[in-house]
Image: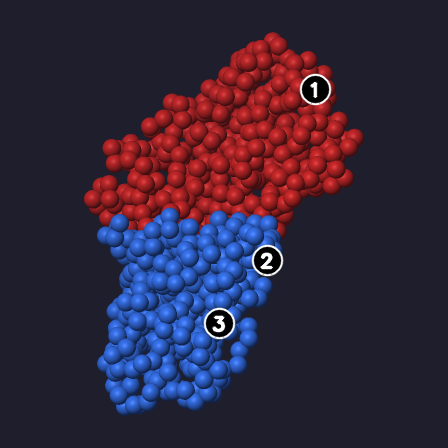
Chain colours: A blue, B red
Amino acid sequence: MLFQQQFLYAPGPTPVPERVQYAMNKPMIGHRSQEFPLLLEAAATRLKPIFGSDHPVTIIAASGTAALETAAANVLDENDDVTVIVTGAFGDRFASICETFGANVHRLEIEWGKTCSPDELRTFLQQTNKNMKAVIATYCETSTGVVNPVHELGKIVKEMTDALFIVDGVSCIGAVEVDMPRWHIDILASGSQKALMLPPGLAFIACSEQARKVIAETKTKRFYLDLNRYFSSYDNERSTPFTPAISLINGALEVCVMIEEEGLDNVIRRHQLLRSMLREGLKTLELPLLTNDQDASPTITAVMTTTDETKKLKKLLHEKYGLSIAGGQKKLKGEIVRIGHMGYSTPYHMLKMLNGMEMALTELTGSSVLGKGTAKAQEVWMQHV
Amino acid sequence: MLFQQQFLYAPGPTPVPERVQYAMNKPMIGHRSQEFPLLLEAAATRLKPIFGSDHPVTIIAASGTAALETAAANVLDENDDVTVIVTGAFGDRFASICETFGANVHRLEIEWGKTCSPDELRTFLQQTNKNMKAVIATYCETSTGVVNPVHELGKIVKEMTDALFIVDGVSCIGAVEVDMPRWHIDILASGSQKALMLPPGLAFIACSEQARKVIAETKTKRFYLDLNRYFSSYDNERSTPFTPAISLINGALEVCVMIEEEGLDNVIRRHQLLRSMLREGLKTLELPLLTNDQDASPTITAVMTTTDETKKLKKLLHEKYGLSIAGGQKKLKGEIVRIGHMGYSTPYHMLKMLNGMEMALTELTGSSVLGKGTAKAQEVWMQHV
């Protein structure tokens, strides 16, 4: 390959900016020291606009799945009815978590690659006709690269039920607009290793007032992921009930500073540009996309590997062109490849991906498409700036 | 611009690899400690193949110009005759340094953008007809992006004179082949901030046995840059006479490890590929190159800015497309731009530069060249791997 780097285009973990890495290298401090409360408050507070939350964001030393479990276990008691909108592997995982805690899970199954429309949710809630404790949606479904219209789904939830609206924001928070009060989101869960540009290891949970009331009453047995312990430790001492991942929190604070410096609106617009550049370039290369433009995530793009040649794309890109992308999961295994473009990603990263795709495709098919997708993506960029 | 990074394509300083940055973050140690001699010996020894030297490389806390001064001041006494081959601004600087120390400097002036041929040197030495103490050549002339044929020039020097052959290797060592004994090089000087992927701050000097003998006899007054002090401190204690730049030496050792891991031959081939990709891409974009293919450096490429549009390239690339390149120096000021491609640089960096050039040119001329240079460079890469 004549160079040693692999360039990471996984849908998470994503590249960690140098300055975040340096922030995580700060000397270790005790979490019962005087300094830690200042750090935790700074991070929890500066994450608020990123989560569109009125309240400080709770930070738990755990990975993204724990964030989902925290949302479920703190809200659902045995036999509670809960609707889970399943648009892919992570909606499915959220449903499994709810089942583990003994809830009556009503799965609103959507074809993978599509989003849940407000009408579909409305019809489902009417037909199910249960007193839902919660309705759960995935904002960006990592396995397919769609973004569900959570702002519209939240409205339906509030119109039709007294349920809490819980949103899995793992693979998009930090890259997309979100407004918990206006969008009627009660719990927004995310992880550190996606658009938030950190290594894996932090679970983030933002909660509404109403969610906190429900959480205080929930009987489901839990200890490490008991949000009441986190709320009371934060409210009383600006601390955590258990040992926090201090270096990752140093990194999270630096991420907040980076996003403030660029401007959250600009960060969001940048991700929209990345999506458009990559999609238009891939279309020009005649690679079929799993999702339509309307539903497409600004953080992840899935390409259907329908031919013998495109099934070899992932391996060739990795071994010869140093670009690491992801395959499909569960029912999409072998059917798609997924390209992450979130967090520490620039328009040049999209051109680089297209550069590599073009060389790999040219090699696989014997017919040159060099520069073609690139030129289209350059056009999109130039129209945008 | 919608992203904050500037991508550095200066002909030095060049990007520092993350793992080198981390190595430089190691805790400070005393230079009179037990650990320091181990570090210095490891770095000085592992630099040997990179400098094509039979002897450990001397490391001085100073920048590249000090490396040139060290070579001059340790060899030349007042009124010594010295030939300096001047192929650009840095050959000119080397001549000025020699003049400062009172040597009789004979400048072999070559048109900027061209190299010195063996015949030109032969004729010059014949016509000058002096007992030269040294002949000085620039391996890669940073101001124009040529590589002089030092292996052939060295042969002429040895055939025709008793002079030491001194080579300025600042902007190429670490990216090109070099063999001091076979090529008759007596002193090879370089700096840390170019192909060696370090921040500025280290001067490197490799010396032959014959050079050491001359250096021992030289009367020119010098203290900090007196190589005899460095030799004796290294030989006796594996140490330095004055406080060394410890963190940079930690970094230098890591650079040696990186080059060993990739393989020096592969590193050299990679730089040749970078040169070919960039040059072929730029030619496709109809940008005139300052040098011919034969003389072109694998580390720096100079583009002539002959039109009103191309004179705006550097500023537009910097402000809108986040690519930092350099302008011309001295008599080439305003006439060229220079693109560095050495050290921590991959084929994708060349594609990125062409991507940006294409967008800037398209914007400046109103005529689209999107994807065109890129496609050509992709072809070159694919033929190479």
**Which x, y percent locates residue B245?**
63, 34
Q: Examine the rendered structure and indicate whether residue A287 appears above or below residue B12.
A: below
User: Can you name the residue that lies furthest to the left here?
Assistant: B366
Q: Examine the rendered structure and indicate whether residue B49 appears above or below residue A67.
A: above
At label 2, the amino acid type is Arg
Dot 2 lies on which element?
loop
Dot 1 lies on which element?
helix
Q: Is A243 situated left or right of B4 in this image?
A: right
The residue tagged 3 is A228
Q: Nearer the viewer, mark 3 or mark 1?
A: 3
At label 1, the amino acid type is Val
Mark number displayed over residue A32? 2
Chain of the residue on which disc 2 is drawn: A
State the separation of the CA atoms marked 2 and 1: 64 Å
Residue B383 visible in this rendered orientation of the protein: no
User: Can you name the residue that lies furthest to the top here?
Assistant: B79
